[in-house]
Every structure is written in structure tokens, then in C-alpha cells.
Amino acid sequence: MKKKIIFAVIWSLAAYFFYEFFKTADLNRTWKEIETAHSRWLVVAILFNLSILLVWTSLWNILVPKNISVSFSKLFQANTFMSTSCNTLPFPGGHAVGLVLLARLAKLKHSVALSVLALDQMMEGIVKVVVLTLAASFSPLPEQMRQGITVFIVLIAIFSAFMFYAAHKIPKIASEDEEISPSILFRVKKFVSQWAGHLELLKDYRVFSAGLFLALIMMALQALGIWAAQKSLGQELPFWTTILVMAALNLATILPLTPGNFGVYEATAFLIYKFSGLSPEMALSLALLQHICFLIPMAGTGWVILLAQSLNLLNGKYKKRASLE
């Protein structure tokens, strides 16, 4: 019953965003704009967003401690399933699923899996700060967005400082000490110690730089996906508009309030495009097409892999049964 109430509230929130922000747009004209979209550019946008998953998996690959071997395919599988969850469930459901998947599919200890996700969020956060600062330097921003950027930068700075402190200052706890103090508090301290020990990337500036570079490529691919969606409707917008749209989306969707950020994503992109001088119909068309081109690979890839695995499993059972007969 509680889950039904929560989902009702979530989808009501999404409906509110759609109604409140898009009531100025003529839906018939919006649909006509969408019908004129060039499919070639939409496919390009989807491919750019699909590439994010490959780069994201490569980032995870270097975040896993050097003494642990995990195949790229297992990490990619866990990554796609987490991406599907993040674009299906509200916060923090997707990240919780990612933690479990890294532990089960990639066979990582929970302390290792948590360190990978924490480092991933740190890298992404630092690059988002760069993008937001870049957006602010290109154009005067709405006051609320400027305040949001300031708060986000402070939070990322605090989080990054804590991560570096944990990597360099939290002492290691020997396993044999558990016999002396088997309390719950000791187990928590031991887990935190193990987690901090897996943050070795923060002690190697070359690997750290490589991680930031991959996170930056992910952002670049996201920007290219937005640009391709704009091209599908024949829009030749200034480069700073694409950066501004991406920055606003990254700021507004930090904590997914609705499944797939439905409503929140569209409302954010819609407002920025209107702020940039586009008509309500064109702004809404771009917002919808961008989100669709983003969700197809980021949410759909996990479902495709899951379906393929299920079909292989059924096929294996069928062959086994046929051989017995």
C-alpha cells in the first residue's frame, strides 16, 4: 500500500511538471515539429548517448583496485543494469541496485563496490563543476540557477575533500584485531577502513587524471547527443546554448525525483530553450526528443541485455530437455 502511495505521489509530481511548464505550448504545433525531425540525426544522438555506457564502464574499470581482476563484460553488464535502474527508479534506488550488482555480477566485496561508486560520483561531480562554471562564463544565468551552482560546488568540494582524507588518513585495521573487539562498532570501523583502503586511485595522480578525462568524455558525449537532437529539428544554436542546457540538466537531475526524471528533465530543458529565445513549441519538441534519445540507450540497453540472457537461458534449458528426450 505504501509503495502504491509513493508511486502515485511520484507520478503526480511528474504530471505537475508537465502541466505547469508546458501549458504555454501548443501541443498540436509541438507534435508537428516532432514529426519533421530527421531520423538520421536522432540515430546519431542515440549513438552518442550509447557511447556514454562504454566510456562509463571504462571509468569503472580503472576505478577497481589494481589487485582485483574483473572482466570488462561483467562491468558493462553491471553498468547497464545500474543505468537502467537509475533511469527507472527515483533516488537512491538506482545507486543501491548498482552497489548490489557490482557485488554479485562483478564478484566484488561490498567495500570495493562502494569505493568504485563513490569514486565514480566524485569524478562525475568534479567534471559537472567544470561544466557548470563553463556555462556560467558563457551567459548570464537565472539567479536560482546561480544559487544552485554555488551550493553544488560547495557540496562537491566537501565530498572530494572527505574522499582524499579517507584515502590518505583513515588507518588500516588488521583482521586479527576483530577477535579482541568483535562489537558492531568495530565492524563498522573495519568496513570503513577497508573502503578507504580501496581508494588507491586518489594516491596516483596519473590514474586520477585518467579518471577525470573519461568523466569529461562522458560529458562531451552527452553534449554531442543534445547537439544531434537540436540538428534533427534543423536548429543551429550557439555552442554555449548546448553547454547551458547540459549544465542545467545535470544540476536539476542530480537527485532523480521521478522515474527516468520524467517531467523534471523536460521542464529544465524547456525553460533553458525558452530562455535562449526559442518558441514554446520548439523548446518542448527539443526537450522531448533529447530525453527520448537519452533514455533509449541509457535505460533500454540493460533491458536488452536482460532479455538476451533470458532467451539464452531458455534456449539452454530447451536444448538440455531435448537431449534428455
Image (cartoon, rainbow, N blue to C red):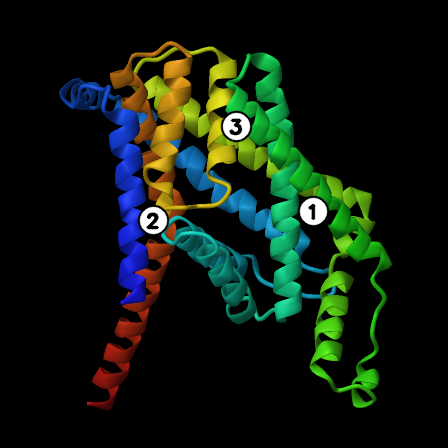
Q: In the image, which is nearer the foreground, mark 2 or mark 1?
A: 1
Residue under numbered circle 2: 300
225 sits left or right of 314 in the view: right
Q: Of 214 and 181, which appears nearest the observer?
A: 181
What element does badge 3 sit on?
helix
User: In percent of the image, x 57 and y 23: which residue is there?
Assistant: 146
Q: In the image, which is nearer the foreground, mark 3 or mark 2?
A: 3
Of the two numbered discs 3 and 1 on the same chain, state the one appearing first in sequence: 1
Of the two numbered discs 3 and 2 on the same chain, state the one appearing first in sequence: 3
Residue under numbered circle 3: 247
| Residue type at numbered disc 2 | Gly
User: Is any part of residue 42 visible from this angle?
Assistant: yes
| Residue type at numbered disc 1 | Phe
Q: Position of residue 79 (x, y in %)?
A: 49, 54
How many angstroms separate mark 3 from mark 1 (CA)?
20 Å
193 sits left or right of 4 in the view: right
Q: Is disc 3 in contact with disc 1, using a CB cutoff of under 8 Å?
A: no
User: Is any part of residue 44 visible from this angle?
Assistant: no
Residue under numbered circle 1: 159
The correct choice, above or below, for 290 with respect to 84 in the image is: above
The correct choice, above or below, for 258 with respect to 21 in the image is: below
The correct choice, above or below, for 84 with respect to 16 in the image is: below
Q: In the image, which is nearer the foreground, mark 3 or mark 1?
A: 1
Q: Of 272 and 154, which appears nearest the observer?
A: 154
What element does badge 1 sit on?
helix
173 sits left or right of 98 in the view: right
Outermost residue on the left side: it is 28
Q: Position of residue 60 (x, y in %)?
A: 60, 52
